[in-house]
Amino acid sequence: MAMIDEPLYPIAILIDELKNEDIQLRLNSIRKLSTIARALGEERTRKELIPFLSENNDDEDEVLLAMAEELGIFIPYIGGVEYAHVLLPPLETLCTVEETCVRDKAVESLCRIGAQMKESDLVDSFIPLVKRLAAGEWFTARVSSCGLFHLAYPSATELLKAELRSIYGQLCQDDMPMVRRSAASNLGKFAATVEPNHLKTEIMSIFDDLTQDDQDSVRLLAVEGCAALGKLLEPQDCIAHILPVIVNFSQDKSWRVRYMVANQLYELCEAVGPEPTRVDLVPAYVRLLRDNEAEVRIAAAGKVTKFCHILTPEIAIQHILPCVKELSSDSSQHVRSALASVIMGMAPILGKDATIERLLPIFLSLLKDEFPDVRLNIISKLDQVNQVIGIDLLSQSLLPAIVELAEDRHWRVRLAIIEYIPLLASQLGVGFFDNKLGSLCMQWLEDKVFSIREAAANNLKRLAEEFGPEWAMQHIIPQVLEKISNPHYLYRLTILQAISLLAPVLGSDITCQKLLPVVVAASKDRVANIKFNVAKVLQSVIPIVDHSVVEQTIRPCLFELTEDPDVDVRYYAGQALHACDSIMMAS
């Protein structure tokens, strides 16, 4: 008997903890509901645990949130889908609590359960639950009900469907703005389940009411409904019902609504089609690009390339490009940054001539912007322009600005330039690179900021990979090795890092002839940091060079370092010797 009781003893504790005064214990127990349910068995879970949870839901929000989440995955513990309706009462109560995140989680769990329920159970249990919530005295119940209609509707009888459509219409005209907001945000999901004939009449009537709501928080959610409904309607209905709403919203008195239109405009254009976009939505978009509020201009500027994809190059040049030029000198740095992040994508749309004539001056002005993010956004997309106008023009027009940025006082700007150097190098070619950018790459090795020096060392490795060992031997190695005698130890450290990165790319011969003597000489440095980094570099080159080199050059140097007065130098030299022995034994 003791054997049987023993596993149940912790379960008894968990059940007791559900009633404990300590919130942490209650939370712990709620999170282990599935363990309790497995121990109780399916029948006792249905008849005892679920009713207990239904009664004990006057708790802290954190506990209720955990309960709402657990109940959503509880169907296996109560005997399967045929008993799913048992889980509805506790979740129905949770849908009425004041805390929004608890209600949202309860609705999410009800949707998960409803999606698995049999049609007859949906009609008998789920639809009545939705109707009760929608008629709830307290607004929280009505808010929650809006998220459940799309599951209830498909299984309902014709009579019930008409009732559900009517109830949803009432929720869209509720006295409480929170209820209307919920109805507006869930309208797309509900509309997707409604038959086409009712969609054009009742749902569009509901939608019209929401678009004229006196609360801007409701209207801005109706903007999302435009895109969702647009995908469900026939093109001609879309033009008749959705297009005028979008145009009105783009002139709404609330900037939040206009911001939402600017954010969703591409999706709205897809809904109405190319022709109405050109005729009606281009003027609306131009208005948004010139809006008084910076937030609206930011949203509109960020969509400029996507929007131009829908248009012909002529319309883009005629209507959109003048606005883009204005935005490039906008008073808000965030507007300019949003524009810079997408403007390069306009080059392939407009073609070579228009890019050279119209876009290049805008690129140049943004490249010289005082705000670092604006400049970075341009640099990171240079390859898109290169594909359109070719490397000669790109180098003549944009390269002076890039060189200027390479010496920018903001280290993050310099860092971004370094990271794009290999990309530029592969696009510009070796000859051009040597003339214009080679000296910069060396200059960065002695930058005051560590991140720049580190990136510069990585950059040399990537360039060696791009142009090959022979090029590196001629253009990188002599200049790098000269810097090992820099009086400042941090710069000498960067050179050691560069050597360890370059060695695998350059191969055994160059490493032995050129790099290794410099590293061995550095082991005599007076700074301990340099000496233990020498040990690390020697360890990294062991796999690259021949065994004879290891025995004659590397091992003696490491032995010498193991007798250094500094503890760190001795430690890293010991590590390197150990690696040396391991590799020798393996071979």
Image (spheres, grey):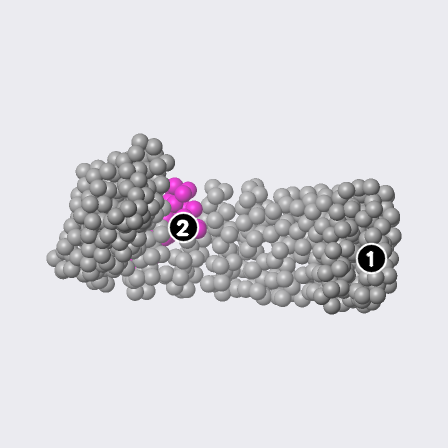
| Residue 261, disc | 2
Overall secondary structure of the magenta stretch?
helix
User: Is 136 rendered above or below residue 120?
Assistant: above
Would residue 243 be counted in the magenta stretch?
Answer: yes
**Mark 1 surroundings: few (<14), some (14-19) or many (≥20) residues within 10 A:** many
Q: Quadrant of residue 541?
A: bottom right
Region in magenta: 239-263
Give the residue at the far top of this rendering.
Answer: 21
| Residue 270, disc | none
Q: Return the residue at label 1.
A: 555
Residue at the image position 33 percent from the left and 57 percent from the top: 228
Can residue 60 be seen in this snapshot?
yes
Residue at the image position 42 percent from the left and 55 percent from the top: 265
Give the residue at the far left of this rendering.
Answer: 159
Would residue 123 be counted in the magenta stretch?
Answer: no
Most foreground residue, 182 or 577: 577
Task: State left or right for residue 533 relative to residue 16.
Answer: right
Query: Which element type, helix, strand or loop, lies under badge 1?
Result: helix
Task: Give, as a three-letter code, the residue at label 2.
Answer: Val
Can residue 467 be seen in this snapshot?
no
User: Is 45 rendered above or below residue 397?
Assistant: above
Task: Give, as a three-letter code, the residue at label 1.
Answer: Arg
Q: Where in the figure is residue 201, as x and y percent of width and height?
A: 21, 57
Most foreground residue, 276 or 345: 345
